[in-house]
Amino acid sequence: MIARMATTVGPLSESDIAEARTLVNDVDDDNRPAPENIPARNESVPNIFNAAWGHSGSCNRKKTGPIDYKPRLEFGNNESMPTVLKIFESFFFQSFIKNVIIPATNQTMPGNRPLTYGEFLVFIGLWLLMATIVGPERRDYWSTKPIDMFEGAPFRLSHYMSRARFELILRHLSFTDKQAPPLLDRFWQVRPMISAWNDNMSRVFSPGWICCLDESMSTWINQYTCPGFMFVPRKPWPFGNEYHTICCGISGILFAMELVEGKDQPRQLRNEEDNFGKTVGLLLRLTRSLWGSARVLVLDSGFCVLKGLIELAKKGVYGSALIKKRKYWPKYIRGDEIKDHFKDMPVGSVDSIGGNLDGIDFDVFCMKEPDYVMMLMSTYGTNIRMGEHKNRDGVEAFQYPEVVHNHYQYRHQIDDHNNKRHQPISLEVTWATKTWENRVFAYLLATTEVNCNLASSFFIGEPPLPSLSFRKELARELLLNPYFNRNVATDERPKRKRTCCEHTFTTLRAYTKWQGSDIIPSSSIYPQRMCKGKHRKVRTYCSCSPGVVMCEECYAQHKLEIDGQ
């Protein structure tokens, strides 16, 4: 049932959503309030707001000094213009690959030629190249049949790596060099990998002055083989793993993530920050690299916890969150009184009311819409209007106040990043696997690919490429990377003595030629090659020996040799 819903085109129907709720243990519902906003029994919430509406005109953030940060990417001592490969290596935890993934993988395949860093990049490049086409099975890319525009894959990959070697690496791929812990932890194999990815991004990338935090999904359809399996009805890919992610609002580059473990999280591994509350702890962990920078964080209503914004402000991070009633109004927010205040105001009217919690000033900025009042809690900003004039019902035209403008301008960055990762062809879907750890790695790889595309456009100044065009370019650089010694044989399968007993004297079809033992298209109608015995140029061969050109005399001698064995 879940598999059917996962492949449904478009939003799920109400009946499907209701049925999925009964099948899945963990559901992230858009209407469920944050844990911190659920009132305790007989709890009395104090009024922490000022007595009068209006804004002082002073912004707490702007008092801190220069705040117009630009995104930065560290390339080490390389002063030349970085290539796509160099950007990829910067983003994709190169040290973790060399020090953990490759040694751990080699440990699991003794007796085989060791995997090297250069060959691992080729392995990744093959996956990216296969993810530019929909339809062919994986084995089709190593087929010995002639390339046919109506059947199979449109290209072959055996020139870069044999299928036997590719499957060997895939079968033994390991992501940790540690032993399983004594406690029940279903995430122990991927924790170091996700942590290494986050640590690497914090070293090489510095986001701009404003960031966006939201959820991302990695698809999976079997909840029994997927730790932390979630159903998120509002997402285009509603089943699988949910990640809380944060990206730069200026460049769109995603730089930190946290896998939602849900009910599978071991109690012994509780995060220290969760003492503030589940949502507050999440905000503190994901923004750790931003502490003390006076950057701005844009949040949707799922993270609308005033205590969270206050704790961020104590760490030197300013934020705003959309206020939405999810069964309850967020704690401390008197939503119904705010709506009454705007009841008789015209569309486009703006007002704010300030307050103080734990010694930190905050404001609730409000704007009258045709059928509701938009509310944003914020620890920065003023009522100054900015941006383009916006229309409502084709009548009213007005500018948004600062916090509302920033919310509309940057709230979509995570969704845009997710769309680039999923569309038009998802690498995670192409990498069809029953090994959940491989799916986590594929998610990190797909996220890094999107980051590389965004970075190439933002930092190098090149026009942004369509997703598939950039994927092909990145795949090409990985396949031709300078670290791989292509003189080393890549076929791990032992050579077998020919057992074929069928021998047919065969002629190549028109407009085809040999490339090794493969038949490929030719621009000329009847290309010929010198026969095995150097008698003359022909287009004939024996069916038992593809690629070995034989004339009639060569074929007769070949038959005598075979019959004499």
Image (cartoon, rainbow, N blue to C red):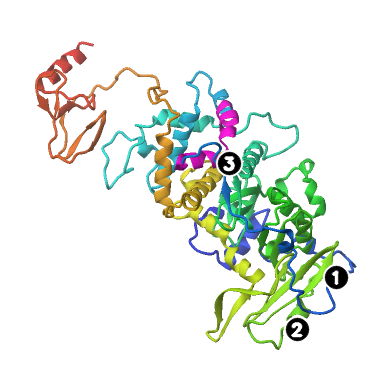
Amino acid type, mark 2: Asp
Which residue is the site of mark 1? 48
Which residue is the site of mark 3? 436
**Residue 505 showing in the rendered view:** no
Q: Is residue 85 magenta?
A: yes
The circle drawn on residue 303 is none
Amino acid type, mark 3: Trp
- Give the mark toward the camera: 1 or 2: 1
Distance between the Cα atoms at labels 3 and 2? 51 Å
- For residue 271, above or below residue 383: above
Amino acid type, mark 1: Ile
Q: Which residues are magenta?
A: 81-103
Residue visible at 68% across and 28% down? 179
Q: Measured from the top left, where is residue 177 in percent x and y?
A: 64, 29
Question: Relative to residue 521, is residue 198 drawn left or right?
Answer: right
Q: Is residue 69 magenta?
A: no
Question: Relative to residue 432, is residue 194 drawn left or right?
Answer: right
Residue visible at 75% across and 75% down? 55
Residue visible at 47% across and 52% down? 457
- For residue 43, above or below residue 497: below
- For residue 253, above or below residue 537: below
Nearer to the camera, 397 or 292: 292
Distance between the Cα atoms at labels 1 and 2? 19 Å
Nearer to the camera, 83 or 130: 83
Q: Measured from the top left, where is residue 228 in percent x and y?
A: 66, 47
Crowding near the residue tagged with mark 3, few <14, some 14–19, many ≥20 C-alpha atoms within 10 Å? some
Q: Measured from the top left, where is residue 188 in percent x and y?
A: 68, 37
Crowding near the residue tagged with mark 1, few <14, some 14–19, many ≥20 C-alpha atoms within 10 Å? few
The circle drawn on residue 340 is 2
Write down the quadrant of residue 183 in the picture.
top right
